Structure formats: structure tokens, C-alpha cells
Amino acid sequence: VQLVESGGGLVQAGGSLRLSCAASGSTARFNVMGWYRQAPGKQRELVASITSGGGATRYLGSVKGRFTISRDNAKNTINLRMNSLKPEDTTVYYCNTQVTFPGNSYYQGEYDYWGQGTQVTVAT
């Protein structure tokens, strides 16, 4: 399983960015997918997540109304649209997915996978 992130960068406060994460894995089923972030010296926190059918989403309180997560199951991709960005949103963002392997008698559980991280910097 591989997660490839893109879309981070530098933006002025009040601006927008879109993060994308493409998941691949020939026998994998991607269940909940989401974005986390981790500032230096702090714990990683969930920013937004979306279920496999796209019917349920969760957001960190401080990003509600500003960030929107979406999912394209045909491409195994999630996107995070980030509007009205603030300097406190500056940090590294990580894509995450919980994966099962249907029909695989060896890997019978649900496994966590992470992307390499993408930097988001919001300038004042």
C-alpha cells in the first residue's frame, strides 16, 4: 500500500490550498481515509476524515467551516480543500488510511498506513 500526497505549499493568510492523497495497493480495500497534522512538539491530531462510502465526515473543531474533505473511490483519492487559512494551520499534514485485505487469510485485520507528509505554511 502506498499513499502519495500533493498540494502543500506556501500561502498568505486567508488564502486556500488543496491537498490530495492517492492510495494504491492491488488487493487493498481503503476504508476510512483522512488527514492528520502534527506541529513540532505536539501530538498528531485528526484534521478531517471520511468513510469509504463518503457518507460520514469528521472535522477538527478549529477547521470546521473552513476545510472540506472529499473522496473519489474510483481513483482511491481524497482531497482536502482548505479555505481561509490561518498561520496556526502551518504544519506538516499527513494522509492516513485504514486498510483491509478481503480474501487474504494472512492479513485479516485492519491496518494503518501513512503518507510521507506535506508541508503547509501560512504566512501572515
Image (tube, rainbow, N blue to C red):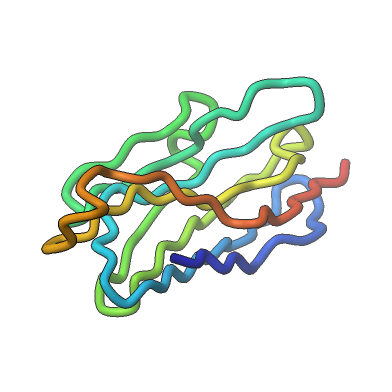
Left or right, residue 95 beside residue 89: left
Residue at x 44%, y 34% (from the top left corner): 64
Residue at x 51%, y 64% (from the top left corner): 3
Decide: is 65 above or below 100. Answer: above
Question: Which quadrant of the figure has residue 112?
Answer: top left
Residue at x 41%, y 62% (from the top left corner): 78
Q: Residue furthest top?
A: 42
Image quarter in which the C terminus is found: top right
Question: Which quadrant of the figure has residue 101?
Answer: bottom left
Image quarter in which the N terminus is found: bottom left
Residue at x 64%, y 47% (from the top left corner): 93
Tell me residue 105's x, y (percent).
16, 56
Front residue of 5/80: it is 5
Tell me residue 60's x, y (percent).
47, 29
Tell me residue 7's x, y (percent).
65, 67
Q: Residue furthest front?
A: 106
Left or right, residue 32 beside residue 88: left
Tell me residue 89's x, y (percent).
69, 37
